Amino acid sequence: MGYRLTRRGILSGGAMGAAASLAACTTSSPAALAEAKGAFPPSAPLPLFGPAEGQALLSRNENPYGPSPSALSAISKSAEKGAYYTNAEAIQTLMALIADRHGVAPEQVVITTGSGEALSAIALIYGPKGPIVAPRLFWDTTSLYAANLGMASITRIPLTDGMEVDYAGIEAAITPGTGMVQLCNPNNPTGLTTPGTIIRSAVAGMAAKTTVVVDEAYIELTDDEAAITCVPLVKEGKDVIITRTFSKIYGMAGIRVGYTISSAETAAKIRATVMSSAPCTSTAAAIACYNDEAFITYSKGKIVEGRQMVEATLDTLGLPYLKSQTNFVYFQSGKPANDLQKAMAAEKISIRGQYMDYTPWSRVSMGKLEDVSRFCKALPKLIGA
């Protein structure tokens, strides 16, 4: 945990533009304007299918080692039946697989087209009830989606000096008029992971006052998923919603499958609010790879290897970074984030630019190892080290 010294672009663009326009009319505070724009700047446009020839794509938290062979085989077979709507039995099969792993009932699971759809639906359900209380820096695109429709507002609680989530501050901000709390563990873009002993206690206290959403998009990449997840709170009957995705560890960002785990009553509300249904190919792929332990181990191993390469480079250069358990690292290069992004782009290496007003901080994602190596070699030259 802490500061070490040594999830969606469409939603982002629409919400960012509307919120920024509103903020410009109502406040001149740079911090307030940054918050209205949201944490996540739009990504640079890319060709239809993946990165261009010669480009190192390290900006979007995708996992290029997926989909697994098991998922690809299922996609191929199910595509032959693409003339037909997805069979309800297939959805129920996937729900049952997820429920069995987590020890909940199938009716407590909702399948969505990526966790982004689930989070957007949840924001539409709870946003009209009152402000969404959240860390200042988190995956906010889906909450801003509801805000863009005039159906939500976000109360952002500053991070600690170590860039960690201030759980005490968030709980103190909850009032009878709060719509919900939204958290992300591990957090994005910081990459920091809160241990289960801390987050479960904090979330349990918050859930006694309001609904709490915990976005666990990256949790399969952590050192000990079982010790960190807040699913046990759902099983205890707490007012908690967990969101997860097949976009990260399973390498299926473009295939779009996510899910929620909550009470059956809450699941029914989410199911009634989502705006699409998973395609047959996505559902088949998810069923095929959900318990593909060989691929999961391989995928995680590649991501961790890339992350260690980045950390070793940052350590050698003496650059500050946050200790991540995800497929990205948040670091300071000594240059403004947007300047480093442009310099990397000139080398055909894509990383993320500035988040809100966190000017010194850059984020690099783990892609193919050869591309991570290109980043590690380019960084010293670009910062004049």
Image (cartoon, rainbow, N blue to C red):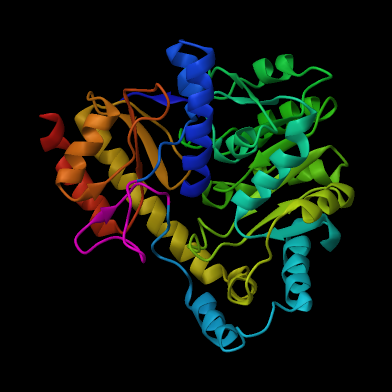
Residue at 46% over, 57% down: 300
Residue 163 visible in the current orientation: no
255 w.r.t. 89: above or below: above
Residue at 40% over, 54% down: 303
Query: In the rendered view, does 277 fall on the left or right side of 39?
Result: right
Q: Is residue 343 magenta?
A: no
Query: In the rendered view, does 291 fall on the left or right side of 310?
Result: right
Judging depth in this view, the residue of 300 and 214 nearest the camera is 214
Quadrant hosting residue 62? bottom left
Quadrant hosting residue 203? top right
Judging depth in this view, the residue of 340 and 37 nearest the camera is 37
9 w.r.t. 151: above or below: below
Which quadrant is the C terminus positioned in? top left
**Residue 113, how many percent across, how many down?**
62, 60
**Residue 102, how many percent across, how many down?**
75, 56
316 w.r.t. 287: above or below: above
Residue at 58% over, 76% down: 281
Instruction: Tell me which secondary structure the magenta stretch mostly adopts.
Output: loop
Residue at 60% over, 18% down: 157
Query: In the rendered view, does 305 fall on the left or right side of 273?
Result: left
Q: Is residue 52 magenta?
A: yes
Residue span colored magenta: 44-61
Residue 136 visible in the current orientation: yes
